[in-house]
Image (spheres, rainbow, N blue to C red):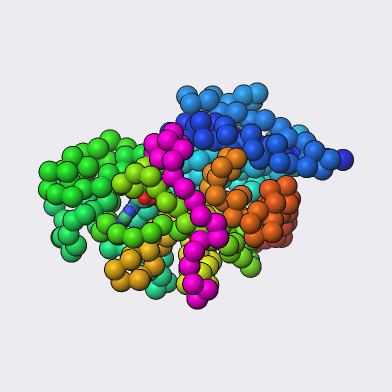
Amino acid sequence: MKTRVAVIYGGRSGEHEVSLRSARSIIDAMDSGKYEALHYVISKEGKWSPRPILPEPGGNPGIDVVFPALHGTFGEDGTLQGLLELAGLPYVGAGVLASSISMDKEMMKRIAAARGLPVVDYAVVPCNGAWKREFGFPMFVKPANLGSSVGISKARNEEELLAAIELARQYDRKVIVERGITGREFECAVLGNENPVASVPCEILPSREFYDYEDKYELDQAQTVIPADLPPQQTAELQRLAVECYRAVDCEGMARVDFLFETATGRLYINEINTIPGFTSISMYPKMWEYSGLPMPKLIDRLIELALERHETKQRLRYSK
Ligand SMILES: Nc1ncnc2c1ncn2[C@@H]1O[C@H](COP(=O)(O)OP(=O)(O)O)[C@@H](O)[C@H]1O
Ligand SMILES: [Mg+2]
């Protein structure tokens, strides 16, 4: 009997198209001798086809495990994970809390900072726009809960800052401002439940002022270097921080942890953690694992194994006296 894997993709977020590409690569890489892929497509309007997952335990008898391949809002942020918890289905990747914390750039920083992990200086912009300025320009302005660089701007002066805040506000009621870091960008893949492990890291070389939406998905000009050209101790430090960040947000399954390296000070900062990283043919999460000795079919085996393991552990828990 093959394991029936419901791959859920598409979705209402701005990363709908990226999700279609991620799902395609995941399904193509799945060992067809072991798995039967069931397609669950969510339209940009939120309509499911062929049918939605039902929130009742036992209500989805044709599914053995779910692979959420949705990026961003309503897929990576804990909402879908909540449905899967209600349904009692095993699923790949982070649970509800880790998903929602990781999606929120402020919460993630708070949690990481509480563990003593390095995050860049930031402030949440209140509705009246006034906050205590503790760092200067350039600044990065971001909607707190989004991805793919949507709504993010670099501000070099007051005028740009106001415009950037206004833009970010269109995407989220919570807007954050960060000190701009001049230097390099790195990424590291993490995999596991209780004992997460880090991959060989990579470096991203944006072709634009920063790694914006066009650079990520349209221009095809950004370059990636794998393994990242770093001295061994810095590689080890980056991997350690990636795993620490993963643990701090209580992540399970997988995540990609992204870093900013400040050239002037030599300091490494955790920028963000993505609990459903891109899985397209050019995405770094599977590439970093491939380089680390885990080709995509094996990576998928492992992710499904981790999903089933977690489910089994949780089934032993009691929910009432
Ligand atoms: N504080 C910062 N300093 C310098 N560059 C930044 C900073 N924050 C973000 N960037 C740039 O903007 C890109 C997108 O920001 P990020 O926080 O990763 O958002 P997203 O979740 O949309 O990927 C980063 O890859 C980097 O190029
Ligand atoms: Mg990013």
Q: The C terminus appears in which quarter of the rendering?
A: bottom right
Between 34 and 180, the one nearer to me in the picture: 180
- The quadrant holding residue 70 is top right
Between 230 and 94, the one nearer to me in the picture: 230
Indicate left or right for 91 with 62 as reference.
left
Indicate left or right for 69 with 145 as reference.
right
Indicate left or right for 272 with 41 as reference.
left
Q: Using the rendered image of the protein, determine whether residue 100 is visible from the camera's viewpoint.
A: no
Indicate left or right for 232 with 138 as reference.
right
The number of numbered badges drawn on the structure is 0
Q: Residue 156 placed where, x, y %?
A: 18, 50
Looking at the rendering, the stretch of residues picked out in magenta corresponds to: 213-233
Q: Is residue 257 magenta?
A: no
Between 302 and 184, the one nearer to me in the picture: 184
Between 265 and 175, the one nearer to me in the picture: 265
Which residue is drawn at the image coordinates 57% and 34% (left, top)? 21
- The quadrant holding residue 61 is top right
Q: Residue 191 placed where, x, y %?
A: 61, 59
Q: Residue 308 placed where, x, y %?
A: 72, 52
Which residue is drawn at the image coordinates 68% and 48% (left, top)? 296
Q: Residue 278 placed where, x, y %?
A: 54, 44
Q: Is residue 205 above or below residue 22?
A: below
Q: Using the rendered image of the protein, determine whether residue 227 is visible from the camera's viewpoint.
A: yes
Q: Is residue 228 magenta?
A: yes
Which residue is drawn at the image coordinates 17% and 43% (left, top)? 160
Q: In this view, which residue lies farthest toward the bottom?
A: 233
